């Protein structure tokens, strides 16, 4: 998402970025890592598959919202054509609406769901802290 958002933000100054935006296609989380060639991709995919259902649902909801917003921008161009006004509208959408959703998705990827309380988190965190402090061994 970061690449297409960057192109959307550059659009007012570089209208030719629209071609790349219109060609951009969304892929799912695991496919992204499978194609990335990044070290540790297998770990990211495994973590996704073993993540709690509520966390994955939250992430997928955010991903759908981001995808819908990008499709909206594409539709504006298809419906009205490329103009300075459309370019500014798309850049504003990217900055004001999509970037905060990407930040929230990043939080979800790291196990954070804003406003959700997980009562297990405190005990898990205490166990991890004590392990690193050398005070005790984690339960097995």
Image (cartoon, helix red, strand yellow):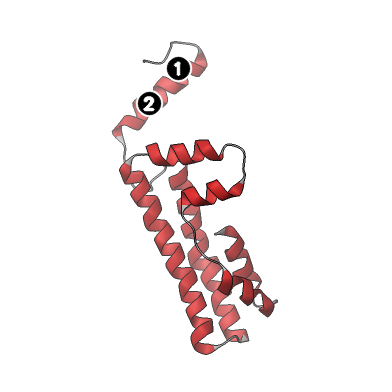
Can the viewer see residue 129 in this picture?
A: yes
Given residues 34 and 79, the one toward you in this image is 34
Q: Residue 67's x, y, as percent?
A: 45, 65
Given residues 119 and 78, the one toward you in this image is 78
Q: Residues within 10 Å of mark 1 (few under 14, many from 20)?
A: some
Residue 121 drawn above or below residue 35: above
Report the residue at 44% width, 22% height from top: 128
Residue 8's tag is none
Residue 8 drawn above or below residue 27: below
Comes first in the chain, label 2 or label 1: 2
Residue 82 drawn above or below residue 54: below
Q: Quadrant of the C terminus?
A: top left
Residue 130's tag is 1
Please report contact status of discs 2 and 1: CB closer than 8 Å, yes or no. Answer: no
Specify the farthest residue to the left.
119
Report the residue at 46% width, 75% height from top: 72
Can the viewer see residue 111 in this picture?
A: no
Given residues 40 and 131, the one toward you in this image is 40
| Quadrant in the rendering for residue 137 | top left
Dot 2 falls on a residue whose secondary structure is helix
Q: Residue 92's x, y, as percent?
A: 55, 73
Report the residue at 50% width, 12% height from top: 134
Dot 1 falls on a residue whose secondary structure is helix
Q: Quadrant of the N terminus?
A: bottom right
Q: Residue 12's x, y, as percent?
A: 65, 78
Q: Which residue is mark 2?
A: 124
Q: Residue 119's x, y, as percent?
A: 29, 33
Q: CA distance from mark 2 to mark 1?
A: 10 Å
């Amino acid at each position: 998402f970061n690449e297409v958002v960057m192109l959307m933000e550059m659009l007012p100054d570089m209208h030719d970025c629209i071609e790349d935006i219109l060609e951009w296609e969304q892929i799912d989380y695991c496919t992204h890592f499978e194609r990335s060639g990044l070290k540790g991709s297998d770990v990211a995919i495994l973590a996704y598959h073993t993540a709690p259902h509520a966390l994955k649902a939250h992430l997928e909801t955010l991903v759908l919202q981001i995808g819908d917003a990008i499709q909206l921008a594409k539709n504006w161009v298809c419906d009205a054509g490329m103009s300075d006004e459309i370019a500014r509208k798309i850049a504003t959408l990217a900055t004001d609406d999509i970037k905060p959703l990407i930040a929230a998705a990043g939080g979800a990827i790291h196990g954070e769901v804003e406003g959700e309380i997980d009562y297990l988190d405190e005990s898990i965190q205490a166990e991890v802290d004590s392990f690193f402090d050398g005070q005790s061994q984690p339960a097995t």
